[in-house]
Amino acid sequence: MPFETPLALLALASVIPLIILYLLRPKPLLVKIPSVMFLMQAEEKKRFFTSITKLIKDPLFLIQLLVLILLALAAAAPYIITNEPLSDEHTVLVIDASASMQNENRFQEAISKAEDYVSKKNSIVIAHNIPVTLLEGQDATTTKEALYSVKAGATVADISAAMGVGMRMLSDGGGRLIVISDFTNWEGEDPVSAKSLAESYGLKVEFVQMGKTTDNVGIIQGRLETTESGYTYNCVIKNYGGSDQNVPVEITTTDGNSVTKNIDLTVKAKATQQFVLENLSTGITTVKINRDDSLPVDNIAYVSVPKISNKRVLFVSDQSLLPSMTSVSLMPGIQTTSATGVPQDLTQFSVVVVAKTNQSLSSSEISLLSSYINTGGKVVFIASDSLAAQSTDLELQKLLPVRTSNVTGTDRGLDMKVNQSTRLTDDLDLDEIAVYKYLNATPRLGTTTLIVSDKDVPLLAFGTVGEGTVVYVGFSDQLGEDSWNNFHNLPEFPVFWFKLVGWLGGSGDISEYNLKTGAVSTLAKEQEITTPDGVETTSRVLYSSAGLYEVAGRTIAVNLYNDKESDTTIDASDVISRASTKDEPSVVRATTYESKNYLDTIMIALVLILVILELYIIKKRGEL
């Protein structure tokens, strides 16, 4: 039997003092009786042998001897090596939680089927458009409990990405990958290709297909447009069945009062039907197909139209012409004000933009900004020479979401990348932005960086100070020969400022209130939000379910709007066929691995049993 720490076997020497202790322990007082004196004298000759005999027969001695031996062996960490099957060692369950899995009872069947594959060590990866690890390396009981806490979402699943997460979990000890899905639609790579890759690394991969084809009528598209008279909603309904269908539609608008009207549509087989709602009121409009079918998630669409309120934005700058201010001033519902210094009363402004080029902020101005931010204000700092470390006050540095240093020039331009994708970065073509100068900076703890350079210099970042939000924009607004970049000349520039001010000011483009499932947004700080599935606290929102979300004071409508996910007539048997008839991998790897099974736990358990037995014997003798 091998030992992990053989030097610990030296503890076996502790049995020697135990034996000596028992041999030398005081003997009972003997009283010699003359009539049997000769017998006692004969006993003296055998005393040594008798002591050893009694020693061996003494149960306490044997118990204590075993305890010392077992403790010494346990310290040496003995183990035995066995060949364990990979599949029994670690099972990763990849469960498709896309919208199509809500068809009839596919998802419930998938959960029930997953139970059959639970082994002694398990992990669960939920396949949304972004893979979500539910648990890793847990026992069977914990895994089964977790399975029944999962709900199907309303996104398009990236099955191959979820399989990739499972492959990384199995990279050390190996195991098996069980993929449970209807395989009707997916994002990313073909799951069959991902299966081949996993099997080439010696992993056992099994596809488990769920569900059967059904008919369905659903809302597959909803487009909200801005017109001169208000908002117009274009809705498209599709009939996936083989016969014409009469589709009753209920339209309810809620803005203080609830107003409902009904229309009937005739949708031909395998065809679509469109209708338009004009002059939508503010609040929530619900479009509902008033009939039961196999996929309820696409029977309801929500439209959110926010109340428009005038916002005031203050620009503090020593430049007369500021591109960012020009862009913001063109936005509807936004009133812009400029000032060369920070005014005493900032409470009237929704957003304050600080874009001083050469003049540094005074201590009193920094104090005013600090009070404004800490009480919930929103401030944007645009990079300039005045924000360089040698020009800024220590108190101003505390307000910035980044630590600034010196201004650096570059002849070759600056390579940039999106560090975290949000709606602020979605429409930016960073390859078109030429940066000639930039402010060296490092993000503070808790700062969210959206755009960075190849040298990890943040160019767009935000964070929180007190109750407020502070944004750092590394693209200077300076014009003329000393301009730092060409961003202000690009068509994306006004769109960027429209989104930024809309996000900070609590208003913005109508599209920000109406999203498709699978969208992700980053909040300024961790906060409580309301989702269709309940209340949660987060700083990053994954809109994985269709319905209404309450996020940072906004009511956001989230809908499926996906033709392929709504198509319940797709038969995915070809995926299973391709997965089962593929060529075997050229590299055949071992299906077992050597596992160390340590015995120290068993030995410690035996020690505890022996100690309890010893106490029982002592009590039985009346010595306790």
Image: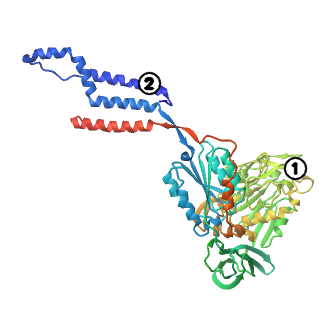
User: In this rendering, would 141 be left or right of 264?
Assistant: left
Which image quarter: residue 259? Answer: bottom right
Please state which of residues 544 and 540 is positioned toward the viewer in this rendering.
544
Extreme residue toward the left, this view: 35
Res. 422 visible in picture: yes
Of pointers 1 and 2, the one earlier in the residue sequence: 2
Number of numbered tags placed on the structure image: 2
**For the residue marked with disc 1, what is the amino acid?**
Tyr
Disc 2 residue crowd, few under 14, some 14–19, many 20+, Cα 10 Å: few
Whole-number angstrom distance, CA of label 1 to CA of label 2: 70 Å
Q: Which residue is mark 1?
A: 436
Please state which of residues 534 and 113 is positioned toward the viewer in this rendering.
113
Pinpoint residue 169: horizontal percent, then vertical percent.
Answer: 61, 47
Q: Residue at x 81, y 79 (%)?
A: 228
Q: Residue at x 74, y 79 (%)?
A: 273
User: In this rendering, would 239 be left or right of 494?
Assistant: left
In the rendered image of this protein, does residue 195 appear above or below residue 220?
above
Disc 1 residue crowd, few under 14, some 14–19, many 20+, Cα 10 Å: some
In the rendered image of this protein, does residue 296 appear above or below residue 434?
below
Which image quarter: residue 515? Answer: bottom right
Q: Which residue is mark 2?
A: 10
For mark 2, give the secondary structure: helix
What colour scheme does the image use?
A: rainbow
**For the residue marked with disc 2, what is the amino acid?**
Leu
